[in-house]
Image: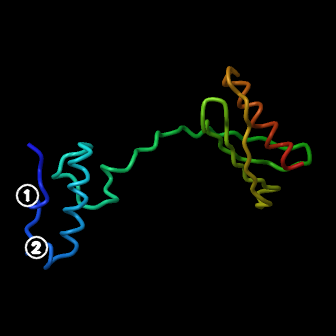
Amino acid sequence: MAATFTDLLTPMQAVANPIALKRAVVRMECIEARSIPTTAVTSKKSAETRPIKKASVMTSVSGKTTNGFTYEGEYEHSNSDRVMWTATYRRSGVFFGMRHGRISELLGVPIVEIAEAVKDDIEFTWV
């Protein structure tokens, strides 16, 4: 049996409490879409209605550039053939800068070679 607007909120409640009216409208939209139970919805931006982003794993890299700077960086796979990285550069422990970048077209490349490609890109970006 389909729920109606009056099942969720009486006309007196709608006039007296505009927030309750907004919540009832959101509940009706969810009931019609059959996306989530009516008891779980509290607002339009509710966690139940937002898509959950897939977690990604950050991998750490570090090394030394040819001009004497040490770097510490992290990279992650943003999709199946792309890596995004960020690195912090220091000389004698003093912060000198930060860079970020991305490497594309890595489909089918082994993980060990991806780490080397990231290190090379970090080196090339700074030098």
Q: Which mark is residue 65?
A: none
Give the colouring mode of the picture: rainbow
Q: Is residue 76 left or right of residue 4?
A: right
**Between 97 and 36, the one nearer to me in the picture:** 36
| Residue depicted at 58% across the width and 40% down the height | 58
Quadrant of residue 114 in the image? top right
Question: Which residue bears the numbered disc 2?
Answer: 13
Q: Is residue 33 left or right of residue 8?
A: right
**Between 51 and 69, the one nearer to me in the picture:** 51
Circle 1 packing at 10 Å, graded few (<14), some (14-19), many (20+), is few
Q: Position of residue 101 (x, y in %)?
A: 74, 46
Does 98 sit above or below residue 105?
Answer: below
Q: Position of residue 122 (x, y in %)?
A: 79, 43
Q: Name the amino acid type tagged 1.
A: Asp
In which quadrant will I find the N terminus? top left
Disc 2 element: helix
Q: Name the amino acid type tagged 2.
A: Gln
| Residue depicted at 9% across the width and 71% down the height | 11
Does 48 sit above or below residue 59?
Answer: below
Q: Position of residue 124 (x, y in %)?
A: 86, 43
Quadrant of residue 111 in the image? top right
Does 76 sit above or below residue 92?
Answer: above
Disc 1 element: helix
Q: Which mark is residue 7?
A: 1
Q: Is residue 33 left or right of residue 76?
A: left
Label 2 near label 1: C-beta < 8 Å?
no
| Residue depicted at 30% across the width and 49% down the height | 48
| Residue depicted at 23% across the width and 42% down the height | 34
Q: CA distance from mark 1 to mark 2?
A: 12 Å
Circle 2 packing at 10 Å, graded few (<14), some (14-19), many (20+), is few
